[in-house]
Amino acid sequence: MQGTLASVAHAALRAIIHNVHVRRVPGAVWLIRHAAEVLLGLTLSGLVAGLGLYLAGAHDAADAAWTVVGACGAGYALWAIGEALAHRRLGVDVIALLAIVGAIVVGELLAAAVISVMLARPWRRCRWTRWRPATCC
């Protein structure tokens, strides 16, 4: 009885949060529907911008761009972990989060940006095609 009560309370809480946040914020529904494209666009453009800045000699600006891309990847990994835990499962997103955070901590910001782009890529492929690889959520 306690397990079903907890699951009902959890579902009700998720519905309340969804209604409060999504319906009251303009554009939130569009962002949820196009989150894959936005995430991949942000991470890929930040990676390319950082490479351009690095080649132009602006190493600090390149590091800043790659840090932002890494933060986007870490944010997505945290969101994916939360979604997985809500369904009582856990995926490789934990490893990706640890890799991104570890790369940022040791100063390998390009590596954090590359991992973030890699993390964003399967999600987009799953939405655009009928083929569902094992890495799809």
Image (cartoon, grey):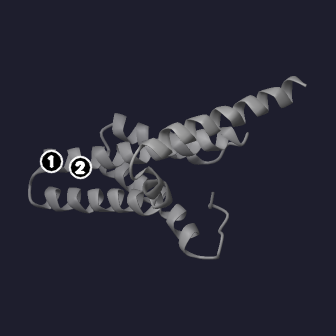
Q: Amino acid at mark 1?
A: Ala
Element class at badge 2: helix
Q: Quadrant of residue 50?
A: bottom left
For image coordinates 33% across by 49% down, the residue present is 69
- Residue 123 located left or right of residue 132: left
Instruction: Quote the CA–CA distance across marks 1 and 2.
Output: 6 Å
- Residue 21 located left or right of residue 87: left
As drawn, the residue found furthest toward the right would be 1
Which quadrant is home to the C terminus? bottom right
For image coordinates 62% across by 61% down, the residue present is 136
Foreground pick, 131 / 110: 131
Element class at badge 1: helix
- Residue 3 located left or right of residue 37: right
Q: Amino acid at mark 2?
A: Ala
Foreground pick, 99 / 127: 127
> Where does the image place residue 80, in percent across and percent down from the top left?
56, 46
From what the image shows, is residue 75 above or below residue 55?
A: above
Q: Quadrant of residue 24?
A: top left
For image coordinates 61% across by 43% down, the residue present is 83
> Where does the image place residue 134, in percent across and percent down from the top left?
67, 63
User: Mark 1–mark 2 contact, CB under 8 Å?
Assistant: yes
| Label 1, residues with CA under 10 Å away: few <14, some 14-19, many ≥20 | some
From what the image shows, is residue 130 above or below residue 19?
A: below
| Residue position for label 2 | 65
From what the image shows, is residue 19 above or below residue 136?
A: above
User: Residue 61, labelled with which disc?
Assistant: 1
User: Residue 18, labelled with which disc?
Assistant: none
Which quadrant is home to the N terminus? top right
For image coordinates 58% across by 41% down, the residue present is 81
Foreground pick, 45 / 102: 45
> Where does the image place residue 102, in percent across and percent down from the top left?
42, 37
